[in-house]
Image (tube, helix red, strand yellow):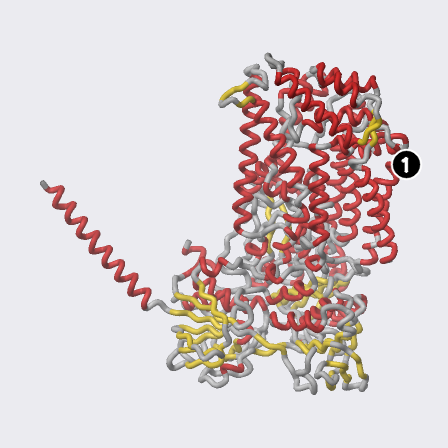
């Protein structure tokens, strides 16, 4: 007669366990951390996704720009007709509900860090347990006269794209556009407008396009390429003022150096971006140009963090800038912070620098550090190669004493990220890089490769005897 | 240059207008001799012959009127026979919308056409296909200048009604669907275009042209003209140039010229690259008998066909992915990559479509295998294909429903007709049983993958948008994962349109091919920590 008794015991203990579990769940639910993220750009959304992967904390993403996450870098393709806006959204609309990530549309006006609440423009409030500030950037303005006229716009937010569609839908409405500021966004805006055959004048402060970043060889190649796309490139000039017509709309601009007046319908201000943090200034959260954070992306206030374009490191990491307004760093900060939020405190270590861009038809990739002549490191030497006819070139930077490989810029040639990342970590020499360059090529199959010509040039210039490692055909059988 | 393009477009339009206008407007006069030959093969009913003798023979009729009269006479004849006390079933003429016109009326209409095009075959060819091909070539050739410097030129695609399901897109859709319906089910109205290619057919294979010769010719012509477009649009991309050239070669040589030459030498019409189960009639009794009766050449074809499906296809997919077939050899793929290329961005990338796709394509594969198994069973058990096996269904019934539903409606009317609505790989993505078979090999045992270049993805969405197979490429690329999907046909456009050089199609070691990564490259968090935790 033992059996019934033990059965009874089991039933009782199961019941007790169930009650306990229910209570625990209920308790957890009530005391679940509420993570609020301001900004649904790549940094904020990456953080949300990784927090969800590692926990079931309550997550709310706040945005005033658009309910659903979209890829900011793809906005240009919407104007150019390569994509629709829907295509720029990496996740379908059901994704957020399925992953239990709340999306709140609204503009935060104030943060109260003592009772942990956010205030919105409509005077509603939202409580948080942990706050992540990921508000990104806004276009930089230098106090030019007329910078707030109708038809003056940046290219950063979705709303900027709507402005562009309004003032520059075609070349009948928009007779000419003037772009001020020769960086990555400037050249993208020029490409966009040219796709609708709108005449473009491109004012660049530097003597050559982006030559604060690019070595002269590359910068000059891009200058030439810009002109080939029928863009009126003006180097070494500054904007003096933007003039208005009687309706408060742009009518022309004046160049500071020459006094020349250029009639135009729109003005694109693309002289860089700065952190979008005005609403934080009144709170006790420490700010400089951006929200000040330590290597754990923590601000001076407990449970408040900042990531992405708006975060400013107290001290620069390696050769990096304190504020990095780059897609990739925003994403990395999101990944890192998600670990910390999920009780795995992790330092932000962005690894080896890499970046990419596309200048009209020319693709650009960079791994490690290659500085322009202006900003070269003390021991930095460059080896350069340029295709005799096509728009392709590379610059490899290395230490002139030790021949340590420092970084590579490639234009019109694709290279493998993981190879260069590994070689930078392993502190390989430039000789090693050249010997293995063919293996690092990432161009589509059947492309003509230039590694042999590159190595030959290096051998002549540095009097070395490097032979390029060729791929063996037997590799098709390797496991 | 723009003016030259417009001239080209106008010429092309005139050619198409004459071509389209000539459909339905045939003139026929059935001679006594033609009628007798036809009636002997097709009709057993004396009632029909007597009535037709009066109403059809030696009277000049439009193709439409002729078809109408034949149908009416057949109906009357059937009514007559059915009213008899003892119904003579062999005298009843089967009337079905998808069979009567092509099997019953078409042969008579083809033999009895007497209009202007029949008297001026050569000239008619030049003012239809000649003008259309010339005009199309001129229009696309001007893109060399009009598109500007070599590079990705997708400007305005989603702002143009032809490529964004606008008015022109809907028009193209209706035109394509209409053409396929007429071609498959009402070739009796296509006599004039068929006559236009008659001289070519005679010089190639020595036979009078049929609707299938017309289709083969148009297929090659359209692919050639649109290949020019591809060569210019992707002139900076050797992968695209080579792939387009090779697929065009296989279409013209293997699917068009070689089979016709075989026929000229009294061998069976045979497309050496058309692998079972895409070539679903390969194991049909009539095909096997036909091949077995064709001497050593026939035996070779039979062995080759079996070898192709069982050995060559999987081995090649193992080394190169299914792209070697779908994007480099296959005719369906070839049309999709040329005529269909302007529509590739219209394929749906939703998760729902992916689910539908997997059910449909594997369903068709199952259907094809089931049908072939039944066919082979009846063949080796020596059961006549029309004899009912179970549930009142015969092997022939299964074959003809597959032929109608999958062979005609799915692969033709929907597969190509819906290019302007659903994107250019509708058939390849949702229906092709060979693609399903190769997809299984590609997913589970292959060296092919699309490699993602570390952490360089900016989630812009160009790759996903321009994937004709509706693969959400970005979903993998933005996580730093390689793309290993059964449906990928390796067209290489995702890698071409990527503005950051993130994607590369390649064959390589199986190890590391599928690489789920929790943390992207570039971030120096201790990767081993995450790996070990799994």
Chain of the residue where label 1 is placed in the rendered structure: B
Q: In the figure, B282 relative to A344: above or below? A: above
Q: Is residue B207 visible?
A: no
Q: Position of residue B181 (x, y in %)?
A: 69, 37
Locate residue A234 relative to residue A154 in the image: left or right.
Answer: right
Q: Position of residue A72 (x, y in %)?
A: 60, 67
Q: Residue shown at 44%/71% (left/top)?
A: A36
Q: Position of residue A73 (x, y in %)?
A: 62, 66
Q: Quadrant of the C terminus of chain A?
A: top right
For label 1, the crowd category at 10 Å Cα-Cα, with few meaning under 14, some 14 to 19 and many 20 or more, is few
What is the residue that sits farthest to the top in this orientation?
B86
Q: Which residue is mark 1?
A: B123
The part of the image, by quadrant, that contains residue A438 is bottom right
Q: Is B214 in front, or is A57?
A: B214
Q: Is B413 in front, or is B151?
A: B413
Q: Is A103 in front, or is A270?
A: A103
Q: In the figure, A39 relative to A455: above or below? A: below
Q: Position of residue A467 (x, y in %)?
A: 71, 54
Q: Secondary structure at mark 1?
A: helix
Q: In the figure, A450 relative to A4: above or below? A: below
The part of the image, by quadrant, that contains residue A254 is bottom right
Number of numbered labels in the structure image: 1
Q: In the figure, B298 relative to B168: above or below? A: above
């Amino acid at each position: 007669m033992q059996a019934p008794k033990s059965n009874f015991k089991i039933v009782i203990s199961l019941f007790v366990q169930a009650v306990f579990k229910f209570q625990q769940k209920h308790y957890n639910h009530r005391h679940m951390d509420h993570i609020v993220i301001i900004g649904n750009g790549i940094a904020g959304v990456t953080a949300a996704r990784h927090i969800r992967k590692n926990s079931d904390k309550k997550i709310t993403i706040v945005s005033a720009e658009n309910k659903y996450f979209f890829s900011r870098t793809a906005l240009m393709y919407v104007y150019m007709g390569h994509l629709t806006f829907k295509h720029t959204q990496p996740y379908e609309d059901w994704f957020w509900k399925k992953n239990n990530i709340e999306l709140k549309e609204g503009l935060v006006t104030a943060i109260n860090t003592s009772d942990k609440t956010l205030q919105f423009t409509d005077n509603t409030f939202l409580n948080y347990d942990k706050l992540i500030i990921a508000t990104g950037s806004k276009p930089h303005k230098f106090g030019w006269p007329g910078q707030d006229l109708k038809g003056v716009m940046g290219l950063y937010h979705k709303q900027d794209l709507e402005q562009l569609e309004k003032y520059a839908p075609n070349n009948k409405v928009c007779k000419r556009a003037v772009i001020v500021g020769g960086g990555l966004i400037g050249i993208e805006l020029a490409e966009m407008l040219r796709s609708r055959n709108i005449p473009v004048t491109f004012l660049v402060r530097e003597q050559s396009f982006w030559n604060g970043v690019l070595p002269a060889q590359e910068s000059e190649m891009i200058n030439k390429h810009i002109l080939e796309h029928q863009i009126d490139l003006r180097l070494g000039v500054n904007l003096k003022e933007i003039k208005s017509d009687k309706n408060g709309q742009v009518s022309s601009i004046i160049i500071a150096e020459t006094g020349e007046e250029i009639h135009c319908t729109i003005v694109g201000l693309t002289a860089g971006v700065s952190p979008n943090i005005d609403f934080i200034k009144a709170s006790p959260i420490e700010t400089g140009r951006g929200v000040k954070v330590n290597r754990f992306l923590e601000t001076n206030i407990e449970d408040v963090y900042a990531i992405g374009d708006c975060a400013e490191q107290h001290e620069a990491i390696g050769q990096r800038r304190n504020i990095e307004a780059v897609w990739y760093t925003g994403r990395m900060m999101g990944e890192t912070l998600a670990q910390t939020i999920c009780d795995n405190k992790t330092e932000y270590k962005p690894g080896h620098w890499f970046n990419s861009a596309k200048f009209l038809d020319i693709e650009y990739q960079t791994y490690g550090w290659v500085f322009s002549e202006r900003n070269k490191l003390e021991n930095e030497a460059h080896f350069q190669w340029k295709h005799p006819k096509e728009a392709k070139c590379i610059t490899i930077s290395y230490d002139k004493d030790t021949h340590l490989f420092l970084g590579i810029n490639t234009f019109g040639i694709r290279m493998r990220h993981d190879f260069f990342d590994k070689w930078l970590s392993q502190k390989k020499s430039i000789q090693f890089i050249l010997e293995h360059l063919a293996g690092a090529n990432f161009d589509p199959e059947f492309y003509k490769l230039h590694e042999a010509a590159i190595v030959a040039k290096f051998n002549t210039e540095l009097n070395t005897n490097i032979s390029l490692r060729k791929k063996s055909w037997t590799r098709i059988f390797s496991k | 240059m723009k003016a030259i393009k417009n001239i080209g477009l106008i010429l092309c339009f005139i050619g198409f207008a004459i071509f389209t206008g000539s459909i339905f407007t045939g003139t026929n006069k059935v001679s006594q001799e033609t009628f007798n030959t036809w009636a002997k093969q097709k009709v057993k009913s004396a009632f029909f012959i007597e009535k037709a003798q009066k109403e059809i023979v030696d009277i000049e009729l439009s193709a439409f009127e002729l078809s109408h009269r034949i149908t009416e006479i057949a109906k009357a004849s059937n009514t007559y026979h059915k009213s008899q006390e003892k119904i003579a079933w062999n005298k009843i003429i089967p009337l079905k919308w998808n069979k009567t016109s092509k099997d019953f009326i078409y042969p008579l209409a083809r033999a009895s056409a007497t209009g202007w095009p029949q008297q001026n075959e050569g000239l008619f060819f030049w003012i239809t296909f000649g003008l259309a091909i010339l005009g199309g070539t001129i229009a696309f050739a001007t893109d060399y200048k009009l598109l500007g410097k070599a590079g990705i030129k997708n400007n305005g695609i989603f702002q143009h009604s032809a490529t964004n399901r606008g008015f022109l897109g809907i028009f193209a859709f209706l035109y394509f669907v209409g053409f396929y319906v007429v071609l498959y089910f009402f070739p009796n109205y296509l006599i004039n275009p068929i006559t236009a290619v008659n001289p070519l057919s005679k010089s190639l294979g020595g036979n009078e042209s049929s609707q299938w010769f017309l289709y083969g010719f148009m297929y090659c012509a359209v692919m050639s003209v649109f290949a020019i477009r591809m060569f210019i649009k992707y002139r900076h991309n050797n992968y695209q140039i080579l792939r387009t050239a090779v697929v065009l070669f296989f279409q013209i040589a293997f699917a068009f010229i070689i089979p016709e030459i075989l026929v000229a030498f009294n061998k069976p019409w045979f497309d050496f690259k058309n692998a079972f189960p895409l070539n679903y009639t390969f194991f049909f009794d009539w095909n096997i008998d036909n091949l077995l009766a064709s001497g050593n050449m026939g035996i070779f074809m039979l062995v080759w066909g079996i070898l192709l499906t069982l050995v060559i296809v999987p081995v090649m997919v193992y080394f190169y992915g299914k792209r070697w077939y779908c994007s480099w050899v296959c005719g369906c793929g070839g049309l999709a990559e040329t005529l269909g290329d302007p529509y590739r961005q219209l394929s749906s990338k939703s998760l729902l479509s992916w689910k539908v796709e997997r059910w449909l394509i594997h369903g068709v594969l199952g259907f094809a295998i089931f049908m072939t198994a039944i066919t082979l069973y009846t063949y080796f058990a020596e059961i006549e294909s029309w004899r009912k096996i179970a549930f009142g269904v015969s092997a022939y019934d299964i074959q003809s429903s597959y032929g109608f539903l999958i062979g005609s409606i799915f692969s033709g009317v929907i597969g190509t007709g819906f290019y302007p609505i659903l994107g250019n790989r509708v058939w390849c993505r949702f229906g092709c049983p060979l693609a399903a078979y190769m997809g299984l090999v590609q997913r589970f045992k292959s060296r092919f993958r699309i490699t993602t270049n570390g952490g360089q993805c900016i989630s812009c969405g160009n790759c996903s948008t321009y994937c004709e197979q509706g693969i959400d490429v970005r979903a993998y690329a933005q996580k730093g994962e390689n793309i290993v999907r059964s449906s990928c046909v390796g067209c290489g456009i995702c890698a071409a349109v990527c503005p950051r050089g993130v994607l590369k199609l390649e064959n390589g070691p199986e190890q590391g091919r599928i690489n789920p990564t929790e943390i992207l490259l570039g971030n120096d968090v201790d990767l081993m920590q995450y790996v070990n935790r799994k």
